[in-house]
Image (tube, rainbow, N blue to C red):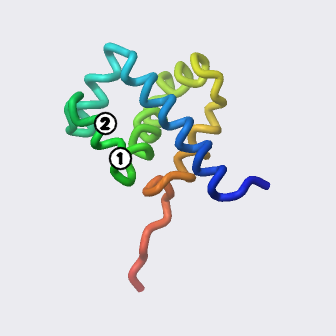
Amino acid sequence: MANAASMREEAETIAVKALGFIAADPELLPRFLAITGIDVQSIRKAAAEPGFLAGVLQFILAHEPTLLRFAEETGTPPAAVGKALRGLPLGNDDHERSI
């Protein structure tokens, strides 16, 4: 079984691939920027923020045709994208609950 550090590294690798995929697509990039509210010049700074890479994967996962195209072009199984999301900061669906 892989340890947490290697799982996170693998998740980050998939997220960085996804960011490159988005950045290279003239239709996806403007949509990603509009949804996230950041501009092109701020991507590098934003990428260092907790949750940014999770947001990249959420963007990919939110639109099945985009997910399938990403999977095909990068050789990444679609299920691996969801698994990677859960391995990143702010990428899980655990929320504090008040009783």
Q: Is residue 20 above or below residue 89?
A: above
Residue at 46% x, 39% y is 57
How many neighbours does mark 2 have within 10 angstroms: few (below 14), some (14-19), or many (20 or more)? few
Q: Position of residue 36 (x, y in %)?
A: 26, 39
Q: Which mark is residue 90?
A: none
Q: Position of residue 80 (x, y in %)?
A: 63, 38
Tag 2, which secondary structure? helix
Q: Would residue 13 appear left or right of 66 to someone viewing this image?
A: right
* Left or right placement of residue 47 versus residue 37 in this view: right
Which residue of the protein is positioned furthest toward the bottom in this rendering? 99
Residue topped by disc 2: 44
Q: Residues under labels 2 and 1: Cα distance? A: 7 Å
The quadrant in which residue 76 appears is top right
The quadrant of the rendering that contains the C terminus is bottom left
Residue 29, x across and y down, in percent: 31, 23
Q: Residue furthest right?
A: 1
**Where, by quadrant of the figure, is residue 25 drawn?**
top left
Q: Is residue 50 left or right of residue 88?
A: left
Q: Residues within 10 Å of mark 1 (few under 14, many from 20)?
A: few
Is disc 2 in contact with disc 1, using a CB cutoff of under 8 Å?
yes
Along the line of sight, the residue nearer the viewer: 28 or 50: 50
Q: Quadrant of the N terminus?
A: bottom right
Q: Amino acid at mark 2?
A: Arg
Label 1 residue SS? loop
Q: Amino acid at mark 1?
A: Ala
Numbered mark located on residue 48 in the image: 1
Compared to residue 38, the image places residue 20 above or below, namely: above
- Residue at left offset 49%, top offset 59%: 93
Q: Nearer the viewer, residue 5 or 91?
A: 5
